Amino acid sequence: MAARKEFGPSQPFKGLNINGSLHMTIQTGVLIETLSALGAKVRWCSCNIFSTQDHAAAGIAKAGTATVFAWKGETLPEYWWCTEQMMTVPGADGCDQLVDDGGDATLLIHKGKEFEEKFAKDGSLPDPSSTTNAEFKCILQLLRDSIQVDKTKYTRMAAKCKGVSEETTTGVHRLREMAAKGELLFPAINVNDCVTKSKFDNVYGCRHSLPDSIMRATDVMIGGKRALVAGYGDVGKGCAFAMRGAGARVLITEIDPICALQACMEGFQVVTLEEVVGEVDIFTSATGNFKIITLEHMKKMKNNAIVCNIGHFDNEIAMEDLEKSPGIKVENIKPQVDRFVFPDGHGVIVLASGRLVNLGCATGHPSFVMSCSFTNQVLAQLDILENCTKAKKYKNDVYLLPKKLDEKVAALHLPALGASMTKLSKEQADYIGVPVEGPFKPDTYRY
Amino acid sequence: MAARKEFGPSQPFKGLNINGSLHMTIQTGVLIETLSALGAKVRWCSCNIFSTQDHAAAGIAKAGTATVFAWKGETLPEYWWCTEQMMTVPGADGCDQLVDDGGDATLLIHKGKEFEEKFAKDGSLPDPSSTTNAEFKCILQLLRDSIQVDKTKYTRMAAKCKGVSEETTTGVHRLREMAAKGELLFPAINVNDCVTKSKFDNVYGCRHSLPDSIMRATDVMIGGKRALVAGYGDVGKGCAFAMRGAGARVLITEIDPICALQACMEGFQVVTLEEVVGEVDIFTSATGNFKIITLEHMKKMKNNAIVCNIGHFDNEIAMEDLEKSPGIKVENIKPQVDRFVFPDGHGVIVLASGRLVNLGCATGHPSFVMSCSFTNQVLAQLDILENCTKAKKYKNDVYLLPKKLDEKVAALHLPALGASMTKLSKEQADYIGVPVEGPFKPDTYRY
Amino acid sequence: MAARKEFGPSQPFKGLNINGSLHMTIQTGVLIETLSALGAKVRWCSCNIFSTQDHAAAGIAKAGTATVFAWKGETLPEYWWCTEQMMTVPGADGCDQLVDDGGDATLLIHKGKEFEEKFAKDGSLPDPSSTTNAEFKCILQLLRDSIQVDKTKYTRMAAKCKGVSEETTTGVHRLREMAAKGELLFPAINVNDCVTKSKFDNVYGCRHSLPDSIMRATDVMIGGKRALVAGYGDVGKGCAFAMRGAGARVLITEIDPICALQACMEGFQVVTLEEVVGEVDIFTSATGNFKIITLEHMKKMKNNAIVCNIGHFDNEIAMEDLEKSPGIKVENIKPQVDRFVFPDGHGVIVLASGRLVNLGCATGHPSFVMSCSFTNQVLAQLDILENCTKAKKYKNDVYLLPKKLDEKVAALHLPALGASMTKLSKEQADYIGVPVEGPFKPDTYRY
Amino acid sequence: MAARKEFGPSQPFKGLNINGSLHMTIQTGVLIETLSALGAKVRWCSCNIFSTQDHAAAGIAKAGTATVFAWKGETLPEYWWCTEQMMTVPGADGCDQLVDDGGDATLLIHKGKEFEEKFAKDGSLPDPSSTTNAEFKCILQLLRDSIQVDKTKYTRMAAKCKGVSEETTTGVHRLREMAAKGELLFPAINVNDCVTKSKFDNVYGCRHSLPDSIMRATDVMIGGKRALVAGYGDVGKGCAFAMRGAGARVLITEIDPICALQACMEGFQVVTLEEVVGEVDIFTSATGNFKIITLEHMKKMKNNAIVCNIGHFDNEIAMEDLEKSPGIKVENIKPQVDRFVFPDGHGVIVLASGRLVNLGCATGHPSFVMSCSFTNQVLAQLDILENCTKAKKYKNDVYLLPKKLDEKVAALHLPALGASMTKLSKEQADYIGVPVEGPFKPDTYRY
């Protein structure tokens, strides 16, 4: 709201196409409205097949604020069709700036250009049968179809796009890999690592939405239960404290000794999944990696153990293996809650089909968190405008937002929480060598 | 389940009518089934106009397990009609034993007999216009109608009922008042004050269901908010720790210096509502008293303050005054969530119309808590059977269940939580002067 | 202080001898001064061989406020000599009223009378060699000597003593056993079970003084450690939350299923000592029972495991067995900190020789807790004065203080913590059926 | 220990002089021994006038492990004399490598060289009367004396020193300022910002040692008290959770909106000191800035408010102003605990004369924290050896230790806490793009 008030009158995005791939929820609607209020023409799709709130999508579409391609419960081919439609700007080669979450839209441009170049070179088309990954199959099919219609669609799109602001750890990770290999086609702003995004979105957001999801989905008492959280990064920290706050006994798995030490120092038990798999009541995967909870694990779980994922992709839990497991039966208890029953009679309760449980079983992060996160997105898009679209200051690399903007996001949200801020005197600011108005910390500071 | 296994074969309740007035939820269904499995003929109604889960009521009715009179969203006259139907056993003067929650069923018998006696003496009928209390008006009308049809219906019902097991603080309080005045018509078992009921139902149950309710109803981030809990009894304690666990700053109001001191010792701020009413984001009433959050308070709240009640009756919040406040407008946001807008433009968001928020906005206490609670109810009904129906050991007074049974309820629930119990040696038991198998504590012990 | 101001002028204890056996600390000094200020002649000893603060004892003795028999580091025979001297009032048969902690003074009177009667009957003297218990040996020797000098000393003392106020769980337990057997020689006031004593002394006091003791004694980081607390009663609850607050992972052992269930519901792991003895870093015994941490346990502990007791007697830890264990060596690290090294080379660090760690290694409970506790003692002594010494209202049984006095103790301590109390309106008080000024809760209420 | 085992045999520091200025405690002794065991000749002084543990200094000196200049309770001139002696290596121009804490040793070299150059240019000597800062006066006097004896002592010392590893935020801040101005004379390793140093030393160390200090110094019950923590950086976070863990109500002051938002999200109240100064029981300054708790604040505090500092320098509290305040009286309660009484009769209890309370009133951080911290120091000194002394890879700038070493420090400490680590599979490592053995996180990761 504050951003609209401050930047709306000057219409900085006037004449620009901004496309986005990000969970199509009520809160995202506010982000879209803000981009639109600042002058942009906006196209949008969701970055997860289950995360769309249909009323949110409908509201935005109806008001004409943006063109939206998203509904709850897309199939994978539908999902990628939506992404393609969103990226395809009628009467233009593509968008000027991109908002991405998880990097699927960015991936599509990069893969599109790659296969178009390959086709130009040797006439070969992408081959969906070359992969067993269901999702990548869809991409290959989509690009196979696209190249046959327009041989340079994604190449032109990549040229037109001046920058992307990426929302998530996973997306930033992919961007860094591309930048490291010299393959990144335009500059990227890492919104994920703003403190007011990463800590608030990951730690506080998940602290709220994990118990919310489990309670809505299962009505199970969390107090007294043994809750295992795989991963003690920011998301895992939020989950662990939420489970403890609700009275559970929390166990952590970790690969990183620093995070493991932090877990110990907070009194959590650090275990391997194998050691405790038969005793745990609630499993939550929060790693950002894959194959964390395997079929073998699920076979050994106690009856009616709850299994969910709040990391990023549904492959944190071996859903494919589970679904194909011989003799497995699925009881749908209610939408997004399935009991997979093994031949021996014991079952595990899987939430949101292994996809993000807070989007599938609750309503995602609460507005306050998203407001922090999306205020960062707006400032990032303005930063791209200044430094990529108008000027060419940024290389094809991954950049953090300036700390001053991060602090601004925080400052904008403090009054609602009743905080009284202390002001640094000039003398004190000089003593510690920072400006009176900030930024207050060195870049290495970890908060 | 354990109770059914242990007592089912001997059919102890065979031939008995057991009536109940208790939130008609899925979990209550399990209680009803257990009473039925032990041989009883069961009739049931809900003890709250909003708390019925229609599918639960339908399930029980359909299976023929009990005769049920309850639906979600009853009017007050409908509520009391349901209560009367539940109490009226076809072909009998009334039930043999009663399960009550809040004391409405017990109240109806006592008031019925009182007015029948008054009518017998002076021919006067109950006069609904003699009271301004909307609920008591319904009772008076009901009894006015009843007496004209059957002059001794409740008198006979009272004579037939051998005892009641009462679920709540409020109900026990009413029973004690009646017992103190010598007006109690049959013995009562205080289930509410069993440790496995009171601590688990009030502290742990509300710790779970308050945040569950607020999150489902509003999707508001609890972290960072200022949350006031009125009352730091067992319910208030559960609420306060839940709000802190979710990251809120918690403020407490109290009248009892001992509870206030406990709140201080846990680091909660003890305030009066008046001091902080304009700063608080979420108000939760948990007192068991009335007129706690008044119209004047709500007039002074900040815009979109959330107001809810997890005490007992809806009169903890001055709903009547609010609804009648001049110029007030009501926006229904979704079922059970209303925004009351004052003429000055600020609004307060009232959950569940001021009735119990965990029943109105969530699904009540989770099964684990209810299992503790209802296992106590079954043992209490068996105790009534032994000591009131078969023998006449109890006077018309209020009794606690023996501590041994309380410990038994706990012991039955521990294996599910993975606890390894230590056994007292004979030598140790003798040293502290208790039996090896318990009970382990004196009656004064507070847990 | 408030008690002195209120009761001092009327000198209620004028002419009375009040004797006490209670840890001779600075805070106890304030209790002694208060009794003295209200007119009593006071004699005192400590109830623990290590708990005397010599400067506190000296201060009281020097000021002439009381006659004190206590020093830090008494031997067992010295301890019982001190107790006898304290009980022996020059020029009188004994004291008029007694303050006791753990029941040693009360035990001495009862045993004294018992053996005097036995001697009168059959001329037999107590035989120290008849017991292997080191402490009971001292008592028998003391009484053997005493009877040879004065055959009815304790019989007359018992007759003169009008009542005792007992400070601890253990002491109350002993009193209840004596009352149950009809052997209690005078009425007893149970101060231990006042809420403002039991919760504040046990829960909050130990929450403060356990980490204080461990940190002072060992300088070991509690964060990250595995801390086992034996017993989850009030003392255990305080200890468990203190260890968690300091970042430890907490494990609980319990015999009582209700307390075990409470521990589970707070997210603590309930284990048997045997299961985890080799992994735990810090063992704290908080049961009030004996033989909790045995020699066999200590043999299996990891090297430099810390072992301490905050229950009541030093026999919670098998100190005698440890000291006599073949090949054991003791390294004194500093006062009250000993490392017992087993022949296999691993050692355990025992604090305060297994006696109360918060008295041996820190300075006992902080003043705020003791002020709550000792205000209760003063009110209890006044209650004995009214109902035992002046009137004979009480039988030889164990009584709780009236709840109104308990609430008064709380109310006297709230202003210091900045609490703003809410006042009950007359209408509200009537609604819940309590006086406007309290008491606010039924006797069964558990807080 | 692990470092000694790994590097001891190769004697990497053989022939090198390593000097250090760092609190001369038992734990530092272990660091000194390790440096010595790796071959270094070590000279040491304390970096705080109160922080020396005399037995630790004596132990090291006696064993001949290092030459030590330090005792508890130095005057300022003595403190700087010690620093100079430590820096003056007999038979050499100075040390080869330096360990610093707070930057005083580094400051002395830089100021020494600066004034020696000024003297060479214009013959002017440092003038102690040119400053009102008591500490800087000492430095100027010391250098005035030094230049008259040896005109290039510090210039030669600067040339000889190949690098410094700095322990604290304050010291790193000073180094960064010097580097930014191009004035830094040798490379510096920032040990402070290693995760295993900063989080463990600041967050967990202070979480342990703040309550330890307050309890030892005052025996005051922390539970129920209002505790204000100035600053919610890492130190402040540790303090805030420690105070909450002990049952206090915690209030925070902050200048940085991000940290303030974090405090809100954990349920702490963010205030200005002015708003609450009259209500708070315990004030802890944890900012790293100066003039935080002023004389005006202390005048308005309640009687017997406790005031302490766990930041860095004693000027966080306006001790000079307090001591000079007209009519002030000082009551020394015990060593390191003074009550300053204002003319109006109210007093404040200042711990450790405003210097670091955990060093003055307790025994500093516990060994586990220091082991993390000092293992980093040893690895940093080895890094200086490789990259500054042997090779010249580093410029005169401030460097972080490689993350791999940070993770190594964590991994070395996990077994003691019973953590079971999960191993990344090759496939998973590739999926997230990190080596199987780490480092696991990007440099921007905040933990």
Image (tube, coloured by chain):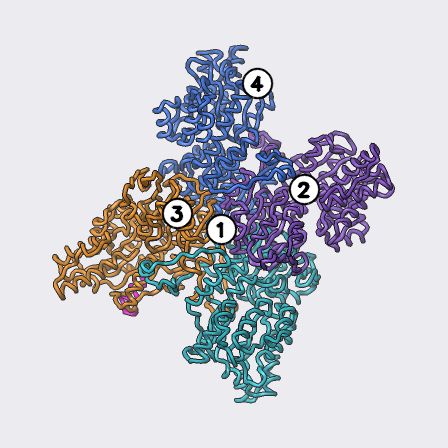
Chain colours: A purple, B cyan, C orange, D blue
Residue C246 as seen in the image, left or right of residue B351: left
Residue at 62% x, 60% y: name it.
B298
Say yes or no: labels 1 and 4 on the same chain: no
> CB of mark 4 within 8 Å of CB of mark 3?
no
Q: Is A96 located above or below residue C35 in the figure?
A: above
Q: Is residue B435 visible?
A: yes
| Displayed quadrant of residue C447 | bottom left
Q: Which residues are magenta?
A: C381-393
How far is disc 4 from disc 2 in space, using C-alphas?
Answer: 39 Å
Residue named by callout 1? B267
> CB of mark 4 within 8 Å of CB of mark 2?
no
Q: Tell me which amino acid carries mark 3.
A: Phe
Q: Depth check: D250 or D129 in front?
A: D250
Question: Which chain is disc 1 placed on?
Answer: B
Question: Which chain is disc 2 placed on?
Answer: A
Residue named by callout 3? C283
Residue B248 spot, x, y in % from top left: 57, 51
Q: Secondary structure at mark 4?
A: loop
Q: In terms of secondary structure, what is the magenta stretch mainly?
A: helix
Residue B343 spot, x, y in % from top left: 70, 60
Q: Depth check: B282 or C301 in front?
A: C301
Q: Secondary structure at mark 3?
A: strand
Q: Tell me which amino acid carries mark 4.
A: Lys
| Displayed quadrant of residue B29 | bottom right
- Looking at the rendered structure, which numbered label has been put on residue D392? 4
> What is the total number of numbered labels drawn onto the structure image?
4
Say yes or no: labels 4 and 3 on the same chain: no
How far is disc 2 from disc 3 in space, using C-alphas?
Answer: 44 Å
Question: Which chain is disc 4 placed on?
Answer: D
Q: Is B340 located above or below residue C77 in the figure?
A: below
